[in-house]
Amino acid sequence: MPQAIRYNLGFPDKYDQPSKRAYIACQEFGHTLGLRHSSNRGSCMFPNDVTAAEVLTSDEIGMLNTNYDIPQ
Ligand SMILES: [Zn+2]
């Protein structure tokens, strides 16, 4: 069954631009799939900084492919 994702609008400075929302969504989906925070600013898994990248790194994507046994 489809589920809605809602941002916590109690923190408007974190959600006032699409890129910030993309960063948050990327990180939360990453956590859901088992990824931890990263020290790499080129990853959306970099914590607590909405100016970090909005995407996963190729290493993180590879980890997900391996963890979920997805052929590459
Ligand atoms: Zn996080």
Image (cartoon, grey):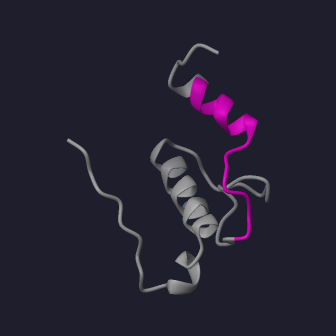
Point out residue 21 in the picture as x, y percentages from the top left corner.
Answer: 55, 66
**Farthest front residue?**
18
Quarter placement of the N terminus:
top left
Query: Residue 56 lies in magenta, yes or no?
Result: yes
The answer to whether 57 is drawn above or below residue 23 in the figure is above
The percent coordinates of residue 58 (x first, y second) are 74, 35
The image quadrant where one finds the C terminus is top right
Taking the image as shown, residue 5 lies to the left or right of residue 17, namely left
Q: Residue at x 53, y 18 (%)?
A: 69
Say left or right for 6 vs 68: left
Q: Is the residue 19 above or below the residue 13 in the image? A: above
Residue 70 image position (x, y, % from top left): 54, 18
List the single residue furthest toward the top.
71
**In this picture, which residue range is highlighted in magenta?**
51-65
Compared with 48, 70 (above or below) is above
User: Which residue is at 67% across, 29% downward?
Assistant: 62
Q: How many marks?
A: 0
- Residue 59 is a magenta residue: yes
The residue located at (74%, 35%) in the rendering is 59
* 5, above or below 9, in the image: above
Q: Could you say where residue 22 lies in the image, as x and y percent from the top left?
A: 57, 60
Q: Give the quarter of the image for residue 46.
A: bottom right
- Of 59 and 26, the residue lying toward us: 26
The residue located at (63%, 65%) in the rendering is 19
Quadrant of ligand 1: it is bottom right
